[in-house]
Each structure stands twice: as C-alpha cells, then as structure tokens.
Image (cartoon, rainbow, N blue to C red):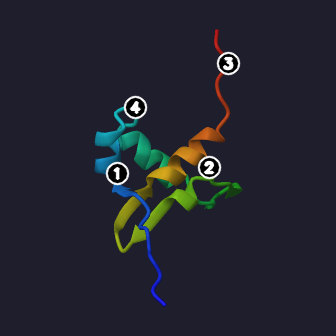
Amino acid sequence: MQHSIHPRPLLSVRQFAAKHSAFTQSSLRALIDKARERYSSRGVVPGNGLAPAIVRVGRKVLIDEEAFFRWLATQPREASR
C-alpha cells in the first residue's frame, strides 16, 4: 500500500518575508526567538505559541506557512482608535 505524502509549505525566514511583505526578516526572527518557553533570572517565560509553526533542521529554521497564519489568527487584535 502506497501512501501519498503532501509536504507542508515550508519557507525559510528570507523566503517568507519576501512572499509576505508585511513581515520583515527581523520581526520574524524575533517571533521565532520567543516561540518556545524560556528561562530568565525571574523564572520561566512562556512562549508566544508559534513553536508548532517552526521546523528546525540543524541550523536551518523553516516556517510552516499554513500553521503560521493559523497562529496569527488566534492573536488578539489591537483596538482601533
């Protein structure tokens, strides 16, 4: 029995920023850095919830495009002035 595998749309930070100009490479890297739970001198700092959309292969960091936008949809919106 053969399984068909549909790869997820994975993009490098550079590719993602080029495709979606609303996000700069710097802003994406900041979000990625805060994706996982981390520790500070004051204790545990929770992650931002983006971790499931990040795929790390060695030093390469890839973004699952669909998962990123699912995560973005769950983020609170700033009220209009």
Q: In the drawing, what numbered circle is on residue 22? A: 4
Q: Are marks 3 and 2 in contact (CB under 8 Å)?
A: no
Determine the CA span between mark 4 and mark 3. Answer: 19 Å
Q: Quadrant of residue 4?
A: bottom left
Quadrant in which the C terminus is drawn: top right
Circle 1 sits in a helix, a strand or a loop, which is it? helix
N-term-proximal mark, 4 vs 2: 4
Amino acid type at image mark 4: Ala
Amino acid type at image mark 2: Asn
Q: Which residue is mark 1?
A: 13
Could you tell me which residue is drawn at 44 percent across and 74 percent down?
A: 5
Could you tell me which residue is drawn at 64 percent across and 23 percent down?
A: 78
Q: Which residue is mark 3?
A: 79
N-term-proximal mark, 4 vs 3: 4
Q: Which residue is mark 2?
A: 48
N-term-proximal mark, 1 vs 3: 1
Mark whose residue sits in front, 3 or 2: 3
N-term-proximal mark, 3 vs 2: 2
